Amino acid sequence: MDAVPVATRTFRTGVGQARVVLCGAAQGLRVSAMRALAWRALSPLSVVALALLVWEYVIPLGIVPGVRAEYLGTPSGIAAAAAELWQKGYGGHELFAHVRASLFRTATGFAVAACIGVPLGIVLGYHPRAGAFLLPIFGFLRPIPALAFIPIVVIWFGIGEFAKVFVIFMTAFLYVLLGSVSGVRSVPHDYFRLSRNYHLSTFTTLFRVVLPAAMPEIFVSLRTAMALSWAVVVASELIAAQVGLGYLIQSASQVYAINKVYVGVALIGLVGVSIDVVFLMIERRMLHWVGR
């Protein structure tokens, strides 16, 4: 009668030991993963910290040939300039007003470009004859930088708000249009044969067949156009702007306030990354079937 309890206790003891071994192995893996993650984070952080220390204490000694040390700025000076801009603003406007003005111009120019460029690109991609007539013109204009359009835009529209938005519109429109054309032309021919077999109208074919198939490439062009629009806003605000990040950078550079220039550049980068993240989230939600 005593053999059964002994065997039971031995079995339970074995299970407990196995659990202890498994828990120990899992904890060891967890510690190893944490160490690997800490090392990965520590390596770039140490490089950044070293670069900041060199910038703060070594660069001001004048080791960069051909550039005066006070024109290179320092991390502490940039932090002080950021605090000053946050508290007092710049040029009679608070800091957020400059960001808001640049965002409004970018969003307006991009929205108009998307509303016109996507439908027109779908039509030009679907009708080869119309595309053969107009696409060479747009293809010729796309490589031209936005700065080249500024003198022409000023002559056409003056130096008002419309001129700034138009420069952004032109840049975004060309990329959206040609990206939409490329998306339509990448649709498999079997889709068009299927639509003809079901006797679908042209509008139904474009809306129900072509557009969903072309959306991945259209979204790529929209994302690229948005990034370019945000980059071009600095150039557009060279047209006699009184508010905006481009104005802040240009005005601060004219009085050699280099630390404020760095703050403006950093804000452009932060906002640009945020916009790109938002676009990625929208793309993954709307095109959830891509890659599956």
Image: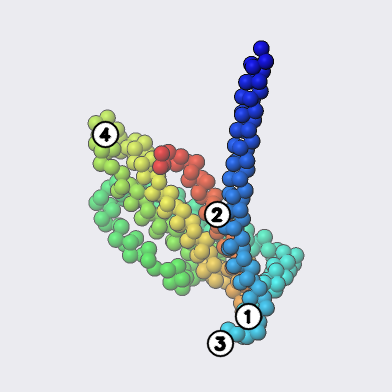
**In the rendered image, which residue does mark 4 sit on?**
194
Inter-mark Cα distance, 2 to 1: 33 Å
Q: Given the current orientation, which residue lies at the most extreme front position?
A: 2
Task: Give, as a three-letter code, the residue at label 1.
Answer: Ile
| Mark identifier at residue 59 | 1
Q: CA distance from mark 3 to mark 4?
A: 67 Å
Alpha-carbon distance for marks 1 and 4? 67 Å
- 1 and 4 marks in contact (CB < 8 Å): no
User: Camera-side residue: 251 or 152?
Assistant: 251
Residue found at the very far top of the displayed protein = 1
* Residue located at (31% from left, 50% from top): 124
- The amino acid type found where label 3 is placed reads Gly
Q: Quadrant of residue 137?
A: bottom left
Which label belongs to residue 9? none
Residue at image point 55% right, 54% down: 275
> Seen from this angle, which residue lies furthest bottom?
66
Comparing 16 with 135, the one in front is 16
First in sequence, mark 4 or 2: give its number.
4
Query: How far across and down, in percent of the image, does residue 277 sit?
Result: 54, 51
Q: Position of residue 135 (x, y in %)?
A: 30, 57
**Disc ID at residue 66:** 3
Marking on residue 275? 2
Helix, strand or loop under label 3 = loop
Picture quadrant where residue 105 is located: bottom right
Q: Residue at 30% x, 57% y: name it.
A: 134
Quadrant in which the C terminus is drawn: top left
